[in-house]
Amino acid sequence: MAKQIIKVEHLEKYYQKDHILHDINFSIDQGEVVALLGPSGSGKSTLIRCLNGLEAYQKGTITFNGKQVEPTEKYWQQVRQKIGMVFQSYDLFPNLTVLDNILLGPVKVQHQSPKVAQASAEKLLDQVGLRDYEKAYPRQLSGGQKQRIAIVRALALKPELMLFDEVTASLDPEMVRGVLNIISKLAQDANMTMIVVTHEMNFAQQIADRVLFLEDGRILEQTKGDQFFKQPQTDRARAFLESMAF
Amino acid sequence: MSSWQIIQQSLPLFEKGFVLTLWLSFIGIIGSIIVGLICSLLKYFRVPILSKIAVIYVEVSRNTPLLVQLFFLYYAFPVLGFKLNAELCGIVGLIFLGGSYMAEGFSGGFDGVSKTQVETGKAIGLSQLQLARYVVFPQGLILSVPALAANMIFLIKETSIFTVIAIPEMTNTALDLIGMYYRSNEYLLMLVIGYALILIPLSLILTILEKRVRYGSFGN
Amino acid sequence: MAHSGINVLFEGRNLIRLFGGLWTTVEIAGVALILGLLLGIVLGVLRTFPNRLLRLVLRLYLEFFRITPTVVLLFLFYYILPRQLGVNLPANQMAMLAFALWTSAEMSDIVRGALISVPKHQRESGMAIGLNRWQLYRYVLIPQAVSLELPATVNLVTRVIKTTSVLMLISVMDVINVGQQVVEANNQKFPTGVFWVYGMIFVMYFAIDYPLSWWAKRLDKKRLERANG
């Protein structure tokens, strides 16, 4: 049996009086790719941010690598080194070069030797075809390039789990493919465990081992990837898929 | 004499100084707003020659201290034949200083109106004057409110410098009393409280006004 | 006749004395700025911490300096320090201290404003790669805040320099005090000298402050351009 990477039990999230997430339960094994789907405002982003400690939750537990996460900033800081996250708005640090963006985590947080870290950063940059840009500043890059660098920055920490939060949502259409290809490759070649929030249904269908369908802060459906797209179990999921197809 | 007696005894004098500070500030602020608005309009419409003069005035005024400006007005000008009494000097000096600060405030607001707003206005065929009247001024004036508010508070504080030409405003009154009776604690305390009485309510009002204006015009 | 008065500047050591006074002014402003800006950065960072009591105390510190005119502040230090606290400093050093604390208060607000306007996503990206609080400030927030705050800081510098003009009130031998003495000593010989001496001081302040505020404006324009496109 594959090793369990993350397990979420009875997670509840309130924002002031609003109940954002209701009794969320799921677990993910090593090497699994999970697509988190659902209409806008269903709580996908909030959920994925909870898994990285960027959002506080009020009830329930998250277990990472067999150990229950204590909901303190200090503990999360340790966990985050093992969880890579990529955001919609890429958010490279504008004051640092591409290489320094990538090295900040490995060198300052994980205290890897700069030489070793740089060597592996350059290897990663090669893989995404941006080796030539290591001395460039973020403002000199296109959106698609920035997002690829942001993925490299997350991978540089050698995470055991990657979270992708709508990473192509603010890219121009012609940039989307390149970024998605990198994520697919990561799943296939590196067997990376990942949770992907996306609106790209073809991509989700192609990559997901499993789909979590979220609506109004509840998980309505947990199904194998191809099954979800061919035979969704709930009416809500069916309606959602129809609305996304055009 | 106890501290309390000292304070009570000097209260009437302080009150006079307090009122004079308020009055001079009021005139100074109104004058500064008028001068500032005129200068910023000259700059906005790029009026030939006059706009250049406005720019020079603004730079000279905001890059020199009020105290030096007052010395010039009060001591140096009489030599040339212009003689003003101290209070008039104070007001003229304050307006000379404040006019440039207010001009910068207004201009900053006008410049802060987003490019897309201006371009949208041009795209529907507004003339330069219409653009100013319907797009740039209404939005720009609101954007300049925080700077204008900060300038008002700044100018009120600057009236304390009037003491150097012996205008009997609040600071001058306090320093005179200290000179006569050597009770620095009591008089300085009264002085700080005096300014707090003017500035705390004013800055609260201005903060509320700022929010109200922004809410009213942009709905957020 | 005004044109003859200009010779007051070249009489004896008058011009040298004026520049000596200017040096005192610059020295006091310089020391006050170095101390005040550094302290202000620390206080500004602290004001973005979650501790409420700390934030309240620092806010009150700021507001005190905000509502007290600098003239009054100077006299508070001038009278209260020696009489109540037994601290006897020369007037120059007392002025440096008063100006440094005032600068730190104003600077703390500039730094805080810049730090909180660094986009939230930047902070989160930093957290996502496991940076701790100190590292987050050191590598992400402060470097970005510096470029945001630079124009305001330069403007603060010009304000502090202008405000040094009130030093004459506590009998520091600054450029204005020296100027007054020069005027009085030469009043008989050059009745219109006053015009030229104060004119000279006017020009001196302008010559220091104008380049600085020109620079601040340019920085601000650049920053706006970058933000817009």
Image (cartoon, coloured by chain):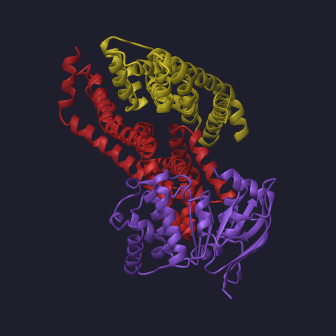
**Chain drawn in yellow:** B
Say how many tags the image has: 0
Name the residue: 23% across, 17% down.
C2
Q: Residue furthest top?
A: B81
Q: Tell me, yes or no, if residue A92 can be seen here.
A: no
| Of residues A191 and C194, the one drawn nearer to the viewer in this rendering | A191
Q: Tell me, yes or no, if residue A136 can be seen here.
A: yes
Q: Position of residue A240 (x, y in %)?
A: 72, 54
Q: Position of residue A197 (x, y in %)?
A: 63, 62
- The answer to which quarter of the image holds residue B42 is top left
Q: Residue furthest front?
A: A230
| Of residues B174 and A45, the one drawn nearer to the viewer in this rendering | A45
Q: Is residue C2 above or below residue C33?
A: above
Q: Is residue A218 above or below residue C111?
A: below
| Of residues B7 and B111, the one drawn nearer to the viewer in this rendering | B111
Question: In the picture provided, is C79 more to the left or to the right than C193?
Answer: right
Q: Position of residue A137 (x, y in %)?
A: 38, 58
| Image quadrant in which the N terminus of chain A is located | bottom right
Name the residue: 31% across, 16% down.
B49
**Chain drawn in red:** C
Q: Is residue B184 above or below residue B148?
A: below
| Of residues B32 and C119, the one drawn nearer to the viewer in this rendering | C119
Name the residue: 17% across, 34% down.
C12
Question: In the picture provided, is C27 more to the left or to the right than A191?
Answer: left
Q: Position of residue C139 (x, y in %)?
A: 47, 64
Question: In the picture provided, is A71 more to the left or to the right than C62?
Answer: right
**Chain drawn in purple:** A
